[in-house]
Image: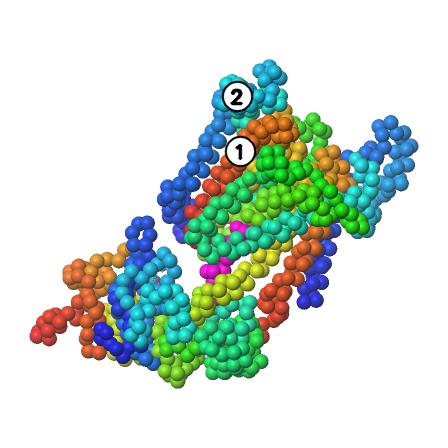
Amino acid sequence: MQGDNQALLSVRNLRIEFPNRRGTLVAVDDISFDIAPGEILGVVGESGAGKSLTGAAIIGLIEPPGRIAQGEIFLEGQRIDHLPYEEIRKIRGRQIGAIFQDPLTSLNPLYSVSRQLIETIQTHLPLNEREARARALELLDEVGIPGAAERIDHYPHQFSGGMRQRVVIALALCAEPRLIIADEPTTALDVSIQAQIISLLKGLCKEHGTAVMLVTHDMGVIAEAADRVAVMYSGRIAEIGPVQEVVRAAKHPYTHGLMGSIPHIGHHVDQLTQIEGSMPRLQEIPSGCPFNPRCEEASDRCRVERPNLQGVEQSEVACHLFDAQRVEARAGE
Amino acid sequence: MIAFLVRRLLQAIAVMAVVALCAFFMFQFVGDPVNQMVGEDATKADREYLRESLGLNDPIPVQFGKFALKAAQGDFGVSYQHKRAVSTLIVERMPATLELAVTAAILAALLGVPAGVYTGLRRFGFTSKLIMTLSLIGISLPTFLIGILLIYLFAVILGWLPSFGRGEIVKIGAWETNFLSVSGLKSIILPAITLALFQMTFIMRLIRSEMLEVLRADFIKFARARGLPNRAVHYGHALKNTLVPVITIIGLQLGSLIAFAIITETVFQWPGMGQLFLQAVQVVDIPIMSAYLILIAFFFVVINLIVDMLYYVVDPRLRVDQPSGGGGHG
Amino acid sequence: MPEAPVGPPSVWHRIWDSDIFYSFRSSKITMVAAFLTALIFLLAIFAPLVAPHSPYDVATVDLMDAELPPAWEAEGDPRFLLGTDNLGRDLWSTILFGTRISLAVGFLSVIFGLVVGVSLGLVSGYVGGYVDSFIMRVAEIQLSIPGILIALLLAGTLRGVLSAEAYNDAIVYVLVLTIGTSIWPQFARTVRGSTLVERNKEYVLAARVIGLSRFSIMWRHVLPNVMGPVLVIATINLAIAILSEATLSFLGVGVPPTEPSLGTLINEGQNYLFSGLWWITIFPGMVLAVLVLAVNLLGDWLRDALNPKLR
Ligand SMILES: Nc1ncnc2c1ncn2[C@@H]1O[C@H](COP(=O)(O)OP(=O)(O)OP(=O)(O)O)[C@@H](O)[C@H]1O
Ligand SMILES: [Mg+2]
């Protein structure tokens, strides 16, 4: 997979650190993955696994003292980490859109929806005020806001939560980005609205050919919307592969635990109790495989040697159970 | 809007009534006004006559009613010390204080707001840290000491500026102004700086922390994620959202400027209301004290009303009374 | 003492957790401030032992020594390090004793304000209803009026009620009352806010179920939680109280010249500034400024250390 020229986004060996006086916390450790054009990549994992940080790194919004300590990020073959501020700013919104968790706080309460839309459109597209407004109206229609023409000049507080998240989606789509990073876009919403927002997002992206990195805790959302899924644990990718394979035939013991039941929307990873214990804090990540203390199949090797991602069927898994020789040995039994 | 204003107005009237009550009780329980007005050797009959004519023998609620009614018309009685109508004394002194306070307010806002925004945006910069350190010194030096130091430096050692008084005053009708003569202008410089310095640092620090608070907000992160230029994010989204608290702060500070003018006026022998009030406190001249109390409360109430109305202009959440959920589940 | 099963972490634990010692060690300015504060406190406490002259002892004061400049100036006298004032009192000794009064008034005022504010805040948050809205309304009105104005009005009123002599005798208490009154609302608001949050937490409900009284619940659970902010407010208000005392004394409604505080000294000295006797004002002024600055720096540091998010 390395150096795949067809990938829209390539993340290579990304490492994100938070230096502090006691040393350095490694929040994201050596992760690599690709997103193909138009593809929806689901990203799951427990709280603190590093999902949001990965997303923030891609759009260049890691807040100091956090920093990208290592690795490269390519968008359509062009390297976008280490870009000067103005350059990465022009990519944000134009080529990579973002949607955050809470629609209630994502919108500026003092600006009308039209103003926020027009401002964003005009930042990226050479349109005059009137054209920008027409486009804003179009977008609101597209994200399914009833009576968009009357509501365009309303303020965020005049919209309900679901409607606000639709406005947020419209804002992310303003300049037709090739990729959208959606960080838990439905977590803050009512269960009844979650499915609508997800199918809206999925529909719009298929229509426009937009790829999505969909961060979520919700296995149902993954099963519903994602093409591929990455499972993160302690700042690393445990398993990544086509959604069918990962959900139905999980390979990594951690993924096994996650997928223990047939997922449906509204089913949260956090509620799963199949796996004993909890993810270690950043200061206490054990040597070897970070999952080893909770893993029933852990061997001595797992406690010492860190497993790397390796191809198994169509997926990649970071687990010593799938080391070539062992698999052969097993097969030979 | 109307309902809101009416409610605010009623609250303001209630506050004024409470303050008037305090002022009235000061009259009631502090000293005997009759003793203050006549000499030690006045006869009993004289005193009784005065009591009666001042209405001091009426029941308390009646006295308070009369007091409030008079106060509302600007009649606060006669100063024990000056033997003149308090209202005249205050009106005479008011221009001096107002000119000083307004000059200081403009100075403080003009320097404090940009400094606060700047230090909020560049909080790790060297200049920001320097400004913050200096501001802490500004907060730690008492106003009167700053005044004294300024006098010592600019009046005693350098001899550039006058050390006390208003200088040459030009009369426009009943208003006596500093601004139309060179010596008047020179005279207001030191007192205005003295008065402004504390307010400036205060405004600056508050705006800085507001700015830091707002910059952490989700909508700022989202604005950045949409690729908006820094200019739009900082001076549009962030600054506008600090406006509500900033208006409150500056509004309230205006009121406290008038109070802090007491100190500045004392240091610079500035013939304003503050000096009048302080002298009154020193000799327990109750009519002036209570009049001043009511006047300051009135200032505060008016400023608060104006601040409330400005909120309406700034914050759309207050303008629209109920959020129309419109198709919340659509 | 038996602890409730699921209590909040104790304040000491949190202070430890917030790396307070580290942040103290890593900030030179804070260390200097702490050193200066400690130095001034000690000098003030031990003023009777440290001061070469007693400013209250008329016998040792000689008018012949009046208005001497500091010892290093040409006309200075080695007996009087910082010179003498207009009455011939040794300025260094007078400053030491003045600082003592200033600090005493500052501390007592903060303690008064703290006790009143914390109690009212607890009551307000826990009882709620009319009591709460009344207390908070008063606090709100008071917060919007500058403390110095309230203090001046109270001082003026008390002047009218008491005789001049009684007033001067009771001046420290008058100042404590007036300054303390002007600072209680901040404590009350903070404590109330915290009480409201804690009131509905499970462990408070649990504590009630196992039959602890309301008071001991508040005492044991709410108080430790607000200790941090209260400490910060207290420190910052100590600086403000010291300033208020100095200001009131400067304005002539505070400590009388016979037993001068720093503010009184500055006020007295101001009259001699024009005749070139700068030291009578400048030295007490410097001590006051350094003291307040040091306490402010400590307060700032404490606030950031207890709440690192703010910086
Ligand atoms: N400013 C910071 N300083 C130190 N550590 C941080 C900081 N921001 C994030 N982290 C750490 O980085 C790790 C990953 O955080 P991240 O926000 O990416 O998690 P996440 O997978 O998105 O979790 P969630 O599901 O809760 O959103 C966490 O352990 C967190 O403690
Ligand atoms: Mg996250």
The location of residue A161, given as percent across then percent down, is: 49, 73
The location of residue C53, given as percent across then percent down, is: 54, 19
Picture layout, residue B158 above or below residue B104: above
**Distance Cα–Cα, label 1 vs label 2:** 22 Å
* Residue B44 tag number: none
Q: Residue at x 72, y 29 (%)?
A: C163
Magenta stretch: residue A126 in it? no
Picture layout, residue C33 above or below residue A86: above
Q: Chain of mark 1?
A: C
Q: Chain of mark 2?
A: C
Amino acid under disc 1: Met
* Element at label 1: helix
Quadrant of the rendered image containing residue B156: top right
- Residue B140 can be seen in this image: yes
- Residue A248 can be seen in this image: no
In this figure, what is the number of numbered marks? 2
Determine if the C-beta at disc 1 is less than 8 A from ligand 1: no
Q: Residue at x 66, y 56 (%)?
A: B304
* Element at label 2: loop
Q: Is residue B251 left or right of residue A302?
A: right
Q: Which residue is mark 1?
A: C286
Pointer 1 local density, CA inside 10 Å: few below 14, some 14–19, many at least 20: some
Q: Is residue A79 left or right of residue B59?
A: left
Depth check: B182 or A311 in front? B182
Amino acid under disc 2: Ala
Mark in front: 1 vs 2: 2
Q: Which residues are magenta?
A: B203-220
Q: Which residue is mark 2?
A: C74
Q: Residue at x 29, y 54 (%)?
A: A24
The first of marks 1 and 2 along the sequence is 2
